[in-house]
Every structure is written in structure tokens, then in C-alpha cells.
Amino acid sequence: MDGTPVTARQVSANSSNTIDARKAISIPLSALQLPGQEEPPATENNLPPAPQPLLGSEADSSPSVSTEPEVSSSQQQPHAASTTTTEPVVQSMPDQDERAAELSREQNEKTIRSTQTALRNFREFLISKYPSETREIYVIPCKELDAYLASFFVDARQKDGSEYEPNSLANYQCGLERYLKEHRYGYSITRDKEFKRSQEALKQKQIELRCKGKGNKPHKSMKLTFADELILRKRGLLSRYNPEGLLNLVWLNNTKAFGHCTGFHGSTLKWGDIRLRVTETGLEYLEWMGPDNGDVNAKSKRGGTDSRVYATQHSPQTCPVQDYKEYAQRRPPAMRYEDAPFYLSIKPVVNLAALHWYNCQALGKNKLAKMVKTMCEKGNIPGRKTNFSVYQSCSTLSEAQSNQLVLICNNLSQQAAQSMASHSNTGNFIVSASYDSSSDTA
């Protein structure tokens, strides 16, 4: 014997792959016996199990044979239980957690950009007015930093020489506050008295700018009115009878019905997030099933609304449930599973008589962000319209408006049916550049 313990020699042999996996390994119980301990009688319970022969690839991929002493089942049980409970968590995270994390990342992007913009503009101001100041702002003593900030709020200008909007300066203050907090600066520039000078300078500058007419929100989006929607319907931009109009229509319905729901985000919307259901009385409805739908603390932003929208049986031509069913029929079968993207890109050339109008490809984020702007520009609707315009519009119509909408949609339905009948062979829809999937870089 060379003095090396039996266990160490055999483990070393296993790590160098020199043991033939087809040969059984026999370890004398005496080798496992502690000094002064009598050898126990051989029974079925304390005999080590004989290794089973492995075949081919099983031997190559099998773990090394352990030569440690056998541990009783009572000692092994806690370890086995912990492995059983933790393994599913390690394997995969639930889909809703992944979706929530994705939404959180997207929501944080704007905050990160805002912080970076504030820091960049403040540093550029320091370089131009105080070129000798090269320190990071989180190491500048509060008295000096307060003076720099006061000077920035009073004298800072945009690149074209014009003054900032009042809200822009306040946003810069908040962005710098976040940056300093990340670097554990000892003071708050928005609350602490050590920065009273810059706080007062910002307030006075905002008053001065508002007196000059600043802060009146010249770029504020205008609400999408009922009259605007009628124009879009008459011009086929909100319609069931062409792929672009149907996509716009379903997007508008979803945003009006579920835009207030927690977790609703157009760019990450999945097909399974909105479900078609039927009540006990046979009335169809759409229900929001996205993330956090079960959260009792998730309050709706608009009073009196919930996560359902019901079919309007008296006016099927304006029914959002019928719009959804039409869109579902026009989707490729391969994109009807729950995790498929809800909004799909349109085929470059579509035969309107064909069953499927859309690609197996998600509509780009850039296009989704400009849905209202694009359709209003095509419809020659004046004013600055954005997706936010939908949230400003009234979601409920008066009886007169509902009757007018039903009448117009019925007329459009008849016109579409006549057009399809007379142009059944040549009824192609060629998508414009704004919806061309090949140019979608989002």
C-alpha cells in the first residue's frame, strides 16, 4: 500500500476516466470502518448496492461512481425534499413573470433616457461656463453644486439658443436627483434646504417662462373625436373589409376597452391576452386576461369600466366582438396560439377574397406607436393626433351618435359587398409603405 486512502485513489481514477464502467466496483466494508469500530454484520440494509452495467453512451454520460459511505435514508430525505421543491423554480419562470419583467424594462427605458439627457445637458453647461470644473457631480460639495444648479436653471439654453420649457427644467432637476441618488449623494437637490438657492431659482425661472408664453403645450395631442372616427370609417381606414382597416379597427377597439387595464401594452400584447367568452345567456364578450388581471388592487383609471366588452347584438356592424372574430379568421392558423403576437404585419399584396391577410410576423413597435398618427394622416384629419388621443376621447356614445354610426356602417357594408362581387378576380389590396412588413425595422 502506498498510504493513499482508498476513497481518494478511486475518486481520482474516476475523474481521469480510467475505470471501466462495465465492471462492478467492490469496496470492502473494512475500508469504510472508523478506527476502533467493530465491523457490523452484513445485512440487506447495510450492504452497498452493486452497480449495474451500463451500455455504450450510458457509460460515457453517467456520473462518476461515488465511494463515500452510505448514508441512511433519514439523513438523505431533507436533501431530496429541498431538491424537489427548488428544481421547478430553477427550470423556468412563469410566463406572467417574464411578461411583467419585459413590461417593467420597457417602462424604465424612458426614465433612463430622461436621466441621461439631464446629466448630459448639465455637464455640457458646466463645460461651457465653468471649464475648470471637471469633477463628477456626485463628488461636488453641496454648496458648490447648489450654485452650479442655480446658474443652470437661470442661464441654460437649448442648442438653437431658445429657452427651455418650464417642465423641461423640472424634468432635468428630477433626472439629476435620480443620478445623484444612484451614487449615494448625501443630499436631495429637490427637498433639502442645502439646495434652497437652486430650488428658488428654478421656481422663479418657471414663472418667468410662463409669463413669456412658454408651457402652453403647443405639441399637445388632440383627442380623437367621434367625427374623426366617422371620417376614418368612410375612407376605409377603420373597416372590416380590408386588412389595414381591420388592423386599425381591432387596435382601436382594444385600446378603448382595455387600455386602462394593468399590464396592457400594445407592443407586447399576446393573442391569449384577450379571450372570446360567452355568458350563461349566450351573450358573447371579450375579456382581458393579461398580466395582473387578478390583482384586486389594480384599479381602473376610468371609473365604471372593467376588463370586459360585450357584443352589441342590435348593431352587429359596429360590434367589437364581431371585429375580433373577423380578425381571428383572417390570421394564419399558425398564429392562433396563446403566446403569438396579437398584431400582425400585413402581406404586401393581399387578395381581398383570400381567407388570410396577415403574415406570421408581429407588427413592429414603431408602427404600433404611430397607429393613430398614420391613419389620421391618410384620412386627411387635421390636428396633432397620437395614440394618446384615443385615451382622451369618450368611450361611450350618445344614442344619436350610435344610430349615426350604425347607419354609416350598414351603408359601408353594402358598398363593400357590391365591390367584392364586381371585382372578385381583381380585388387586390396593395399595402402602402407605412405598413410594408419588409421595411419594418422595429
Image (spheres, helix red, strand yellow):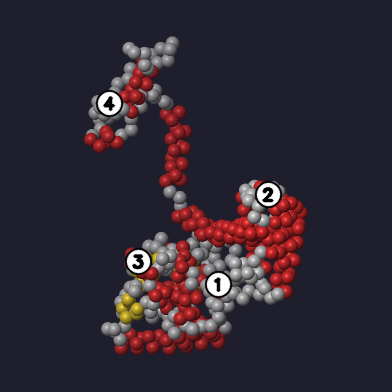
The answer to which quarter of the image holds residue 76 is top left
Looking at the image, do the residues carrying marks 2 and 1 touch, with CB atoms under 8 Å apart?
no
State if disc 1 and disc 4 touch (CB < 8 Å): no
- Residue situated in front as seen by the camera: 32 or 358: 358
Residue indicated by mark 1: 388
Q: Secondary structure at mark 3?
A: strand
- Label 3, label 4: how far apart the Cα atoms are: 53 Å
The reply to whether dot 3 and dot 1 touch (C-beta < 8 Å) is no
Residue located beneath label 3 in the image: 360
Front residue of 348 and 146: 146
Q: Quadrant of the N terminus?
A: top left
Tag 2 secondary structure = loop
Rounded to the nearest whole Å, what is the CA distance between mark 2 and mark 1? 41 Å
Closest to the observer, 359 or 377? 377
Q: Is residue 439 left or right of residue 227?
A: left
Question: Alpha-carbon distance for marks 4 and 1?
Answer: 70 Å
* Residue at the top extreme of this rendering: 36
Mark nearer the N terminus (2 vs 1): 2
